Image (spheres, rainbow, N blue to C red):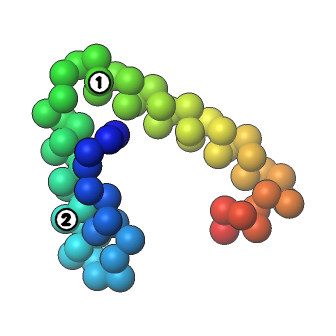
Amino acid sequence: MYGIDYSGYNSNDRKERIKAITKVANEILTENDETQQKFCDVVTQMQKVFALVSIFFRSQRYFF
């Protein structure tokens, strides 16, 4: 989603990461139903791609 500050997610501080995740979740939940559904669809597609790609030994070095 555009316009949301994700920078705290990369922090080494656990509290900052939780704060960033909560902030993003709140942003998504305040959007209209169409935007929420689109977000869920994209996340589902990304999970499917990851599931397919992660089974290959050569690709594991990029993800793990």
Amino acid type indicated by mark 1: Thr
Query: Is 40 on the left or on the right of 42, as rendered?
Result: left
> What quarter of the picture does the N terminus occupy?
top left
Point 73% across, 41% down: residue: 52
Quadrant of the image containing the C terminus: bottom right
**Residue at mark 1 to residue at mark 2: CA–CA distance:** 22 Å
Residue at 18% x, 35% y: name it: 29
Residue wearing tag 1 = 35
Left/right placement of residue 36 relative to residue 49 reads left
Residue 25, position in %: x, y?
23, 46
| The disc label shown at residue 19, or none | 2
Q: Is residue 21 visible?
A: no
Rendered location of residue 5, percent (x, y): 26, 56
Dot placed on the residue nearer the N-terminal end, 1 or 2: 2
Q: Residue at x 56, y 31 (%)?
A: 45
Please tell me whether mark 2 sits on a helix, a strand or a loop: helix
Q: Quadrant of residue 34?
A: top left
